[in-house]
Image (cartoon, rainbow, N blue to C red):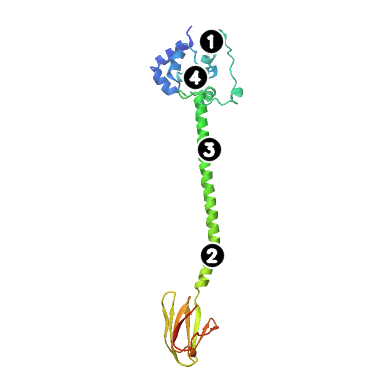
Amino acid sequence: MQTIGEKLEEARKRKGISIREAAETTKIRGDYLQKFEANSFDIDLPPLYIRGFLRSYARFLALDPDRFVNDYNALLASEGKPARRESREVYGRVDFGDAARATETGEAVPAGRTPQEQAILIKFGLLALGAIIAIVLIILLVNVLFSRSSTRAAQAAPPAATATVQAEQAQTLTLTATDATRVKVVQDLDGALLFNGTLGRGESKSLKKQGKLLITVEAGKNLRMEVNGRSYPVPLEGYGRFALD
């Protein structure tokens, strides 16, 4: 009577497939397949994994998977090992990674991937995810703080801007001659000449001023001044120059 390994080897050679080709197609490690064909199941894997590999390899060779699993269970029983079939309900609660899914679905586990490697990959994946989340939270926090600072600056800016506009708002200077006199008005802020001429008796001249003015008058006693309707005295009687804030 042929052993499990002899049946597997005969079926593989009948198809003209090498161990390497079978391993690449089934994604089962080549040394495992060699041990299966040598009827050696002394592999450092739980019986659950070995059954899954046997099922996948038998299906790949167009053999009856259940028959090979039963033969393997019988071999375990003859060696004095329990040949019970682990139920999906029990192992469904434990994450065996790809190997457990290989047993339940008949698909093979990727070569060289062990449960320990799966656990390491999951650990690093969680660490990477945590780092990404932390970076996103930091960026959001910076944006929120920057937005609040900008809002406060924007809210504080209008009063200052308004005060500046009000401070720089032009005032109206009205010059009135009680008798003929010559007047020269220069704006100290930018040196602009606002007026330079003679005012006849009873004649008035209105000017827009910003800041301090430098006024030169020929006869101060003949000049009256008003700024926005408010009277300002001329500080000299005759010829001279004075400043008007």
**Contact check, label 1 and label 3, Cβ < 8 Å:** no
Q: Which of the two discs, 1 and 3, sits closer to the camera? A: 3
Mark 1 neighbour class, 10 Å CA radius: few under 14, some 14 to 19, many 20 or more: some
Quick check: marks 4 and 3 in contact, CB under 8 Å?
no
Kind of residue sitting beneath label 4: Phe
Nearest to the observer: residue 173 or residue 61: 173
Q: CA distance from mark 4 to mark 3?
A: 35 Å
SS at mark 1 in the image: helix
Residue 196 percent across, percent down from the top left: 41, 85
Classify mark 2: helix, strand or loop: helix
Q: What residue is at 43 percent from the left and 17 percent from the top?
A: 31
- Placement of 176 over or under 97, stated as above or below: below
Q: Secondary structure at mark 4?
A: helix
Camera-side residue: 74 or 124?
A: 124
Q: Does dot 3 land on a helix, a strand or a loop? A: helix
Disc 2 or 3, which lies upstream in sequence? 3
Residue assigned mark 1: 75
Up the image or down, 214 lies above or below 114; here it is: below
Spatial CA distance of label 1 from label 3 is: 47 Å
The answer for how far apart the CA atoms under marks 4 and 2 are is 76 Å
Residue under numbered circle 4:
53
Q: Amino acid at mark 2?
A: Pro
Between discs 4 and 3, the one toward the N terminus: 4
> Which residue position is annotated with label 2?
158
Mark 4 or mark 1, earlier in chain: 4
Q: CA distance from mark 4 to mark 1?
A: 16 Å
Where 147 falls versus 205 (above or below)? above
